[in-house]
Image (cartoon, rainbow, N blue to C red):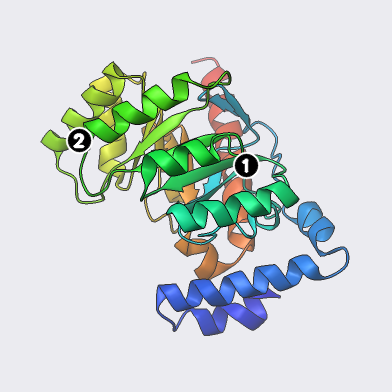
Amino acid sequence: MYRIFIRPFVRGMKHEKASRVALSYFRLIGKIPGGRLINRLVHRNRAYGLQREVFGLEFYNPLGLGAGLDRRGDLYNDLEDFGFSFVEIGPLDLDGTRHAIANLQKEPHDDILAACISKDIATCFSLAYDFCDMFVIDMSGGLDPAVLDQIMDIRLTYDEYKPVIIKVSEHIGRQELTVVLEYCMLNGVDGIQVRKAQDVVLVNEISSGRFPVMANCHIKSPVQAAELLEAGASLIEIQSALVAEGPGFVRKILSYLEKHFKNAQIAANEPS
């Protein structure tokens, strides 16, 4: 239905407007009796052989929805039904955080939920801590050690440990990324979110593959998704591609990854 009725229109729109149209469609489908059940059956998110543990959390597969679509936490469960193993809501400010919490109190999330926080960071982090599974702190404007130190101190006041991931700018340079990564590794940050494939490689090079990387790198094909994972990404995200291509794109990526890594394992086990 998305491919027939929505995709031809959103492809000619600016991304922000296209996202609003797509979100309205996803909301409508969720309100149809049995709509969410049908989505779960069609867009299975438990693809065989793709499970992985990252940040101490069990993911059904490595593919998540990046921030920027469900900005205020309105459709997290509906979006997870499309096959994502996690959904990242936001970027959140104080008003958005309060709105998302009100929704989560009415309808707890079904699978792993990440909150991307971009403003009022310490306050939003404190308010949302009990409601989300992991947090992406948007530092794309530059590393702020004082804010991150405050976040780490706040986390110590809770009994349950939840992962904190730092999001860096798409335009970050090698030297600055190195500084950010070294800070993260020395100060209890659990992972880093990058926007370029070469930054995935760089993080793995600097950390010797010991620091988890979340890659939100404008994925446009299943092949690109596999390449990012092979380059060292622990998790990958899409956002604009969901709007442009529809939920079927999630299924295409997961099906490709399932076959790709199964074939790679078979090849690795064959006698030389």
Q: Is residue 48 left or right of residue 250?
A: right
The relative height of residue 175 versus residue 244 in the rendered view (above or below) is above
- Where residue 82 sits in the image (x, y, percent)? 67, 55
The relative height of residue 270 versus residue 34 in the rendered view (above or below) is above
Identify the residue shown where x is 65% and y is 35%: 60
Q: Amino acid at mark 1?
A: Ser
Q: Is residue 72 left or right of residue 142?
A: right
Q: Is residue 226 visible?
A: no
Q: Is residue 114 left or right of residue 145?
A: right
Label of residue 95 in the image: none
- Where residue 43 sits in the image (x, y, percent)? 72, 54
Q: Residue 242 falls in which quadrant of the image?
A: bottom right
- Where residue 213 sits in the image (x, y, percent)? 39, 33
Q: Secondary structure at mark 1?
A: loop
Q: Nearer the viewer, residue 84 or 50?
A: 84
Crowding at mark 1 (Cα within 10 Å: few <14, some 14-19, many 20+) = many
Q: Secondary structure at mark 2?
A: helix
Crowding at mark 2 (Cα within 10 Å: few <14, some 14-19, many 20+) = some
Marks 2 and 1 sit apart, C-alpha to C-alpha, by 27 Å
Label of residue 85 in the image: 1
Identify the residue shown where x is 57% and y is 57%: 99
Q: Amino acid at mark 2?
A: Leu
Q: Which residue is mark 2?
A: 177
On-image quarter of the N terminus: bottom right
Identify the residue shown where x is 62% and y is 47%: 84
Q: Is residue 205 visible?
A: yes
